[in-house]
Amino acid sequence: MSAPPQDAGKRRPAITPARVVAGLCLFAPFVGILWVDSYARIEPTLIGVPFFYWYQMLWVLISAVLTMIAYRIVRREAAGARRAAASETVAQAAAESGEAR
């Protein structure tokens, strides 16, 4: 039987605070749009447009901003993981070269 990989004990958790925040950013538009009772009315109007319509159009903009925030959070977390893996590899190579002497 083969030995388990060396990184098996050092795996990063699948659920991190950054991923939770990103998930909430992506989930908020669903709640805002699918909770129809909160905006199923005509008043207040905005430039003659009933609330029902301009509320939904506002969520289009809000959704775009929240999606951008979620993307940047996940991207920053992935970059941090790559930096950590690279520094770990460098440290491991330095330790191995020190043992070889």
Image (spheres, helix red, strand yellow):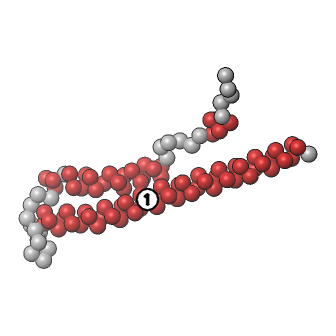
Residue 9 is drawn in which quadrant?
top right
Q: Nearer the viewer, residue 80 or 97?
A: 97
SS class, disc 1: helix
In the rendered image, the residue lying farthest to the top is: 1
In the rendered image, the residue lying farthest to the right is: 101
Dot 1 surroundings within 10 Å: few (below 14), some, or many (20 or more)? some
Note whether 67 is above or below 11 in the view shown. Answer: below
Give the position of the C terminus as an image quadrant. Answer: top right
Give the position of the N terminus as an image quadrant. Answer: top right
- Residue drawn 15% across the image and 53% down it: 36
- Residue drawn 13% across the image and 63% down it: 52
- Residue drawn 74% across the image and 52% down it: 90
Would you say 46 lies left or right of 70 here? left
Q: What x and y, as percent, mark residue 5?
A: 66, 34
What residue would you read off at disc 1?
71
Q: What x and y, as percent, mark residue 42?
A: 8, 64
Would you say 36 lies left or right of 64 here? left
